[in-house]
Amino acid sequence: MTTPVYQNYINGHFLKNQSGETFAVKNPATDDVIYYVEVADAFIQNAAIQSAKQGFAAWSTMSPIERSRILLKAVALLRERNDLLAKIEVLDTGKPWQEAECVDVQTGADVIEYFAGLAPAQVGQQQMVGEDFYYTRKEPLGICAGIGAWNYPLQIACWKSGPALAAGNALIFKPSEETPLGAIKLAEIFTEAGVPAGVFNVVQGAAEVGQWLTQSADIEKVSFTGEVGTGKKVVASAAGSLKDVTMELGGKSPLLVFDDADISQAVSAAMLGNFYTQGEICTNCTRIYVHKNVYQQFIDELKTRTEENIIAGDPLDPNVNFGALISKKHQQLVMSYIEKGISEGATLLTGGKALSPASAPNGYFVAPTVFIDCTDDMTIVKEEIFGPVMSVLTFDDEDDVIHRANDTHLGLAAGVFTKDIKRAHRVIHQLQAGICWINSYGNSPAEMPVGGYKQSGIGRENGIETLDHYTQTKSIYVGMTNIESPF
Ligand code: NDP
């Protein structure tokens, strides 16, 4: 059987590039090339802009309710094709089917549905100023760009296209070169649902294609999901044409477990927030601060459950709940952090090695790893690892742990476990993070705005306010009286 080759998706259909350049995509669980993708060369890039201009002209003049109706058809198609799309995500990312089947497509569809519903509800304002008045219109920005990371490829494409399209913009989306297929399938679904050609285009390639999007003067906004370092480059480049930016970047988030917490629940949160999607989640609580009085109980349960309940293996096996990392290179990076943790004096409670499960012997697995005896200055406690590596620290004073939790240039997420309702709110209000959980961790419904404090991001995704990030306000002053002119 020949390996498929996917082209860029421009103006409602696949378009062949002129350079003939392609890249290979591997299944992280098998190390096999599963398909090739054509790189968006200058011809494709130019076509994407022309197509988005035409798409924008058609889409932005439709009424919001018409756009909403079409987007809701796409939502229905996404849900209908859940299993097919979830399988694509499993093969591209190495994450377990168990997760993709119930999370990736559904949380993506939810966000498009949410913004489709909101689109017709967006209103301007009107105010009298003497006998004159002004009114405002919420107008789309024009052509927007989306650049995605590889951990939730389809979900990220949905989270960016949902508000962008609902508000009447055209979008050119670049998925990560590690996981390019989900966005193509979304493009096909949009076309099938009736989204006009050119409204959602998918360009493929690595950093150079992303850089082109950030530089193009025809693009009004870039919504980026990725690493802090890349985000800084994107902002710098976008400044050249004063583009609007949304930045969804990395984190090193704290979870504070007080001594009155339900410890089993706190262990569940810590495991979900470090081992779900084999640790490749931006909001992960990779710094777990446990009160000294419950520390032993916490780590005993954590060790038992990590060693007994996590099943690594072929991600397509529905019993597997722990998949492969995205690439060999990333596996090596995660292993190098583990070595640093050991050399800097942390103690391995469990894990700490690469895995080669019988059902997926060539996959890029790293065992779920827990370090104890950690200190705040260790590299594993300070830097985002983006793999299944948890650092456990202890505390006995509330103010002190808040200070330690905040002592980072990142501020994506944070969590608190306690049964004391006053303490829960008091502490969470002092934590410098954009996405916070009390006695919970990781849930991110479409209704809830998400984004980072400090260097973890700019702007928000999801929630009502995101629609404002994809529109601009036009003020229109209406003269009802004669102009008084000194001339
Ligand atoms: P990267 O920053 O490496 O890449 C993100 C995207 O940017 C990819 O599509 C990449 O292309 C592209 N890119 C790379 N260089 C440039 C550039 N100079 N200009 C424009 N685009 C560029 O992130 P990862 O893909 O490795 O994703 C992991 C990171 O994403 C983690 O730090 C994680 O925390 C963060 N993340 C944040 C989320 C949030 O919502 N806050 C959610 C998910 C992840 P290519 O990969 O094809 O080279």
Image: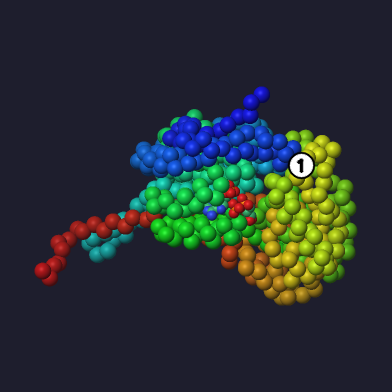
Residue 4 is left or right of residue 423, and the answer is: left
Name the quarter where the C terminus is drawn: bottom left
**Res. 25 visible in picture:** yes
Residue 359 placement (x, y as % from top left):
82, 36
Residue 365 is left or right of residue 123, and the answer is: right
Which of these two is toward me, 462 or 329? 329
Whether ligand 1 has any atom under 8 Å from the Cβ at mark 1 is answered as: no
Residue 487 is left or right of residue 71, and the answer is: left
Q: Is residue 370 above or below residue 409?
A: above
Q: Amino acid at mark 1?
A: Gly
Residue 156 is left or right of residue 474, and the answer is: right
Report the residue that reaches farthest toward the left.
487
The residue under label 1 is 363
Disc 1 secondary structure class: loop
Which of these two is toward me, 30 or 452? 30
**Res. 63 visible in picture:** no
Report the residue that reaches farthest toward the top.
1
Give the quadrant of residue 334: bottom right
Residue 73 placement (x, y as % from top left):
51, 33
The residue positioned 78% from the left and 49% from the top of the image is: 366
Q: Is residue 181 above or below residue 227?
A: above
